[in-house]
Image: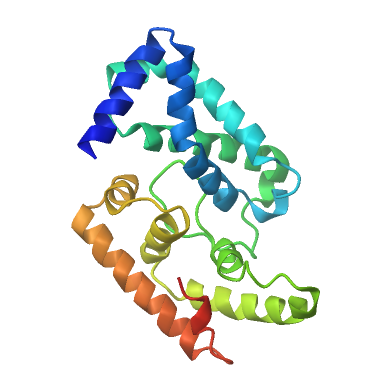
Amino acid sequence: MAGDASETDRLLQRAVGGDQASWGVLLTQHEERLRRMIAFRLDQRLQGRIDASDVIQEVYLEAFTHLADYARDPVMPFFLWLRGIAGNKLRELHRHHLGTHMRDAGREVSLYRGTLPETTSAALAAQLLGHLTRPSEAAIRAEVKIRLQEALNSMDALDREVLALRHFEQLTTAEAAQVLGIKEKAAGKRYLRALKRLKDMLASMPGGLGGLAP
C-alpha cells in the first residue's frame, strides 16, 4: 500500500508538471474501479441512455482542472477523490434527467454520508440477480427481485451501504471507512455483519437463494 501511494504521488507530481503520459497512467490504473462505481450508482432508469465512458471522460476533465489544488492538499487517496467527482457528475445527470422524480415512492434510499447517489435496495437486488438473464426466467426474476428488495429494506441503512461499497464497488475496508466517516474496525465489523445477514435472508427466502449470496 505504501509503495502504491508513493507511486501515485510520483505520477501525480509529474502530471501536475504537465506530463500527459503520467496523467494517462494514473487514470488507467483507476478506470476499471471508477467504471464499476458509475455502473452501480447510475439510476437504473438511465442505464442504456447514458454511457459510463462519457461520464468517465467528464470526470477526467474535471479532475485535471483541479489537479494542482488536489496535489497541494491531498486530503484523501487519489481514487476516492476521483470517485467523489464521479459522484457529483452522477448527481448532476440524475437531476437533469429525472428532476423531481428522483425520489419517488418506489425508490427507497439508504443513509449515505457523501456526495454520491445513495445505494438503493433496487440497485442491490439488480446486482445480486444479474446473472438471471434468460427470457424464460424473466417472470421469476421480477418476483424474486421484489422479495429481495423487501428483505434488503429491512437491513440497517449503513450496513446496506457498507455492503455496497465493499462487495459491489470492491472498496477496501479502509476506503469504505473513509467514505462513510467511520473507524476502519467498525467498517469491517459492519461488512461481516451485513454479509451474514444477507446470506441468511437469501437462504430463508422461498426456493432458497443462498446461491446468489456474495
- Image check: 194 left or right of 148? left
Determine the residue positioned at 43% across, 7% down. 18
The residue positioned farthest toward the right in the image shown = 135
Residue 214 lies, with reference to residue 120, above or below; the image says: below
The residue positioned farthest toward the top in the image shown = 17
Q: Nearer the viewer, residue 29 or 77?
A: 29
Q: Quadrant of residue 11?
A: top left
Residue 66 visible in the displayed image: no
Determine the residue positioned at 58% across, 33% down. 56
Determine the residue positioned at 65% across, 59% down. 104
What quarter of the picture does the C terminus occupy?
A: bottom left
Q: How is the image coloured?
A: rainbow
Residue 145 visible in the displayed image: yes
- Image check: 71 left or right of 164? left
x, y (%) of residue 127?
57, 64
Q: How many marks?
A: 0
Residue 130 lies, with reference to residue 4, above or below; the image says: below
What quarter of the picture does the N terminus occupy?
A: top left
x, y (%) of residue 168?
47, 58
Residue 140 lies, with reference to residue 192, above or below; the image says: below
- Image check: 109 left or right of 100? left
x, y (%) of residue 123?
58, 61
x, y (%) of residue 196?
35, 77
Q: Nearer the viewer, residue 110 or 7?
A: 7
Q: Quadrant of residue 67?
A: top left
Determine the residue positioned at 28% across, 29% down. 75
